[in-house]
């Protein structure tokens, strides 16, 4: 399992990312309570596309699983709120 922890000022931010071998990539996002979080992905940091919406599991805490992550050797994530 690979873990990534990120600390960045502002909202929303990706607080943590975990990839299970041959499984989904899980994102924990910190954002504004009650506002939806759209998750976008890119393989080149130029072309971005929506891949889903994160679910708010606690006030200001959002979770998202990318089931297609194992199909990409490198994938970047962007959160819009």
Image (tube, rainbow, N blue to C red):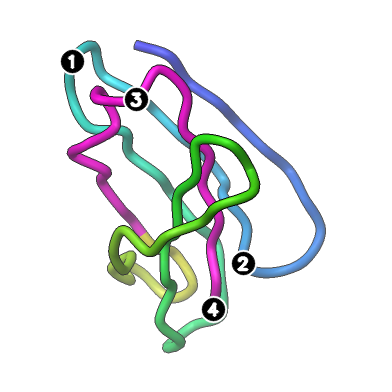
N-term-proximal mark, 2 vs 3: 2
Residue 71 drawn in magenta: yes
Q: Which mark is residue 12?
A: 2
Q: Which mark is residue 35?
A: none
Which residue is depicted at the point 33% across and 56% down? 63
N-term-proximal mark, 1 vs 4: 1
N-term-proximal mark, 2 vs 1: 2
How many residues crowd mark 1 within 10 Å: few (<14), some (14–19), many (20+)? few
Callout 2: helix, strand or loop?
loop
How many residues crowd mark 3 within 10 Å: few (<14), some (14–19), many (20+)? few
Residue at mark 1 = 22
Q: Nearer the viewer, residue 48 or 1?
A: 48
Using the numbered discs, state the Cα–Cα distance from disc 4 to disc 3 in whole angstroms. Answer: 25 Å
Residue at mark 4 = 81
Using the numbered discs, state the Cα–Cα distance from disc 2 to disc 3 in whole angstroms. Answer: 24 Å
Residue at mark 3 = 72
67 in relation to 21, above or below: below
Write the start and end of the magenta stretch as one range: 63-81
Callout 3: helix, strand or loop?
loop
How many residues crowd mark 4 within 10 Å: few (<14), some (14–19), many (20+)? few
Mark nearer the viewer, 3 or 1: 3
């Amino acid at each position: 399992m690979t873990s990534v922890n990120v600390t960045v000022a502002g909202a929303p931010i990706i607080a943590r990312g975990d990839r299970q071998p041959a499984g989904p990539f899980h994102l924990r996002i910190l954002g504004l309570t009650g506002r939806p979080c759209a998750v976008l992905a890119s393989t080149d940091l130029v072309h971005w596309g929506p891949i889903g919406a994160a679910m708010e599991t606690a006030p200001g805490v959002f979770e998202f699983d990318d089931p297609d992550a194992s199909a990409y050797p490198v994938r970047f994530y962007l959160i819009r709120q």
